[in-house]
Amino acid sequence: SAISTPWYASFAVQGPAATALLQELPAGHPPRLPRFPSVRAVWAFFGAPGPGGMAGKAEHVDALRDGVTVHRQILGQKSWSLRPNPLGDWGVDGPPIVAAAGSRLRVTCSEGDMLVVDTGRWYHETELLAGESGFSLSVATDLAEAAGELEIAEQTTVLV
């Protein structure tokens, strides 16, 4: 049946329960990524967008420590709109040029896709898309290792 009232929610799990949650995800961990022997927290984002989609989190940057965030789309679809944070630590070259001033990158994650992004260096906002299931579920965790050291699987978009 169709969703009559769109809704969106999120929660975080910390400590040993966070690691246990990651180990219980469908199909295990994404291929060729570390098994995350211990993580500080896992965030779950879920909702029913209704037929026209719905806004998820409004544009923001995260107060990150060194590392990247690994976002895994478990069910449904989520669209990300990203732009470089001019105050981010981009080194001597400065932030990447996306295209015209003020433009954004748009990445759509479908079931099984993964997005690895430094959410402290990239402003980001999300939108849940109406898919076959009518439901979107994704999980994210921070990864302290440098993204350049990761072996990245297919179906993965990396923005660091």
Image (spheres, grey):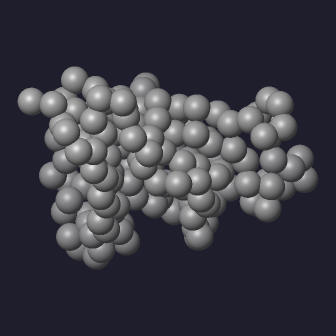
Q: Is residue 155 above or below residue 121?
A: above
Left or right? Give the position of 100 relative to 34.
right
Question: Which one is in front, 67 or 34?
Answer: 67
Q: Quadrant of residue 67?
A: bottom right
Residue 54 % position (x, y): 39, 41
Left or right? Give the position of 13 relative to 52.
left
Residue 124 % position (x, y): 58, 49
How many numbered marks appear?
0
Question: Which one is in front, 131 or 156?
Answer: 131
Judged from this view, the residue extending furthest toward the front is: 4
Does residue 153 appear anywhere in the picture? Answer: no
Question: Which one is in front, 99 or 56?
Answer: 56
Question: Which one is in front, 22 or 2?
Answer: 2
Residue, x 69% and y 44% (percent of image)?
A: 83
Residue, x 19% and y 39% (percent of image)?
A: 4
Q: Is residue 77 above or below residue 132?
A: below
Residue 72 % position (x, y): 36, 43
Does residue 87 appear anywhere in the picture? Answer: yes
For the N terminus, which image quadrant?
top left
Q: Quadrant of residue 44?
A: bottom left
Judged from this view, the residue extending furthest toward the left is: 1
Residue, x 27% and y 35% (percent of image)?
A: 50
Left or right? Give the position of 104 relative to 152.
right
Judged from this view, the residue extending furthest toward the right is: 92
Residue 65 % position (x, y): 58, 70
Judged from this view, the residue extending furthest toward the bottom is: 15
